[in-house]
Image (cartoon, helix red, strand yellow):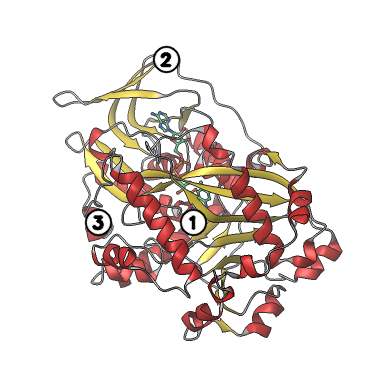
Amino acid sequence: MSSGNRTVYERLAPPAAAVDAALAHSRHAVFWLEDAPGTSYSPLTADSAADLTVVGGGYCGLWTALLAKRRNPAARVLLLEAGTIGWAASGRNGGFCEASLTHGEENGRSRWPDEYDTLERLGQENLDALERDVRDLGLDCEFERTGTLNVAVEEHQVDWLRDSPGFLDASAVRREIDSPVLLAGDWEREGCALVHPARLARELARVSATLGVEIHEHTEVTGLDTGAGGPVRVLTGGGTVVSDRVALATNVFPSLLRRTRLLTVPVYDYVLMTEPLTAAQRASVGWAHRQGLGDLANQFHYSRLTADDRILWGGYDAVYHRGRRVRASYEERPETFHRLASHFLTVFPQLEDVRFSHRWAGAIDTSTRFVAFHGLAGRGRVAYAAGFTGLGVGATRFAAEVMLDRLSGLSTERTRLEMVRRMPLPFPPEPAAALGINATRWSLDRADHRQGRRNLFLKALDQAGLGFDS
Ligand SMILES: Cc1cc2nc3c(=O)[nH]c(=O)nc-3n(C[C@H](O)[C@H](O)[C@H](O)COP(=O)(O)OP(=O)(O)OC[C@H]3O[C@@H](n4cnc5c(N)ncnc54)[C@H](O)[C@@H]3O)c2cc1C
């Protein structure tokens, strides 16, 4: 491959020994979950009854339960979680809480040109409301409305940024974050906040319980019996809940409804966390405004500071395993962690002495339109939302409102949206799914090596409405 076709991470790769040293003492554990105090909730052990049963104790289920109590404090609301609160994606993500409900403007405008402006406004209102909830409910989740800094690390990416309102040239962007590979940036100030992901989940559970939501951990829902009418029977090993309404917030895990099983696939995303930086190390990178950081490649990295000045560094590889399973064994992938550590040292060569303390991974609930879908089943008694595609920290709160609107039979601005009414195309069954997803990933990597130029396969996907340009 000629040097012109190599990415900056290949042109300026650090010595392998430096990468090995940086990773040598890392543990496979989720930093956020270790750093989030929480209560445990007992499993369900007897039959019960509820006005609303929420399945899933990630953000989507937690917001649904909490907002249901806000709408109707007298309602009996149960939340059933197979593991523990926030153990899955909600407790292990990057903590970028985006206003966008559409995974960016380009994806949104191309799919819903007529309602994009409404979607943008509703997304902004959702983030503002979430910020108000954090403040008014006293959610201790290290919320910081920093915005994001999108950066160019290759010459061809600079042109993509030039017309953006927050454009920063090389010297201006390096005054924000000091890295020799940053060529330009765009600081989007309003559209994103950062949170401590696991604390947000556990705080939502704490407040929900205070409002009267009955939470049960280690309670897997094994099936729904919607019968001919009347209440739904929610089946678990510990007892059956007879419930007027049910909200399914099970994300990437096997759906309790056959109709949505082909609508998402789990794609694994990998993350490293450093030890806390010393004052001198912190000074060497600047980063006074603590923005979320993302680069513009198809295979992009995301990065941010924690409250104790660690750096989180994730993204790039996005790995799909044939068969659509969610498995703990997929979370350990040495070659990916090495690649991530190497890229980190390319971006921050001054941090060669910094060590990674944690490494982990999680499954992204990917849908073919890269945006969540919302639906209703069981003659209007069961609502569901999933497919957030790595954009669920903020969008799950919006999805919770949609589920509650629909379960109450309300017609609102939210429920009338085409984005909400229409379902995405399903993924094909195996082996076509694995072939298609892996060909897409390979092509996106090639595009990153060819100054962003997309091959025929990607152009065909774009035409079919299945393409994605981060
Ligand atoms: C590594 C990583 C980084 C990410 N970074 C970001 C980011 O920076 N910004 C962003 O916006 N998004 C990000 N995401 C995506 C975001 O985390 C998710 O979209 C969001 O957390 C989804 O929330 P959820 O409640 O739908 O799902 P989850 O948090 O996965 O919760 C679903 C819950 O349902 C439970 N469940 C499933 N089936 C059952 C059942 N049958 N019975 C009982 N319980 C059940 C599961 O145990 C689980 O706890 C990231 C994801 C990952 C993995």
Q: Disc 1 vs disc 2: which is toward the camera?
A: 2
Mark sitting earlier along the chain (1/3): 1
Which of these two is toward me, 68 or 392?
A: 392
Provide the secondary structure element on which disc 3 rests: loop
Q: CA distance from mark 1 to mark 2?
A: 34 Å
> What is the number of the mark on residue 176?
none
Residue type indicated by callout 2:
Gly
Q: CA distance from mark 3 to mark 2?
A: 37 Å
Q: Is residue 338 left or right of residue 398?
A: right
Provide the secondary structure element on which disc 2 rests: loop
102 is higher (above) or lower (below) than 254: below
Residue 432 in sight: yes
Q: Position of residue 164 (x, y in %)?
A: 48, 82
Mark sitting earlier along the chain (1/2): 1
Which of these two is toward me, 361 or 105?
A: 361
Residue drawn at point x = 32 percent, y = 45 percent: 433
On whether ligand 1 comes within 8 Å of the CB at mark 1, the answer is no
Residue type indicated by callout 1:
Leu
Q: Position of residue 365 (x, y in %)?
A: 41, 46
Mark sitting earlier along the chain (3/2): 2
Q: Looking at the image, which residue sits at the far front? A: 1
Residue drawn at point x = 55 percent, y = 80 percent: 155
Disc 3 and disc 2 in contact, CB within 8 angstroms: no
Q: Quadrant of residue 360?
A: top right
370 is higher (above) or lower (below) than 199: below
Residue bearing mark 3:
412
Which of these two is toward me, 302 or 450?
A: 450
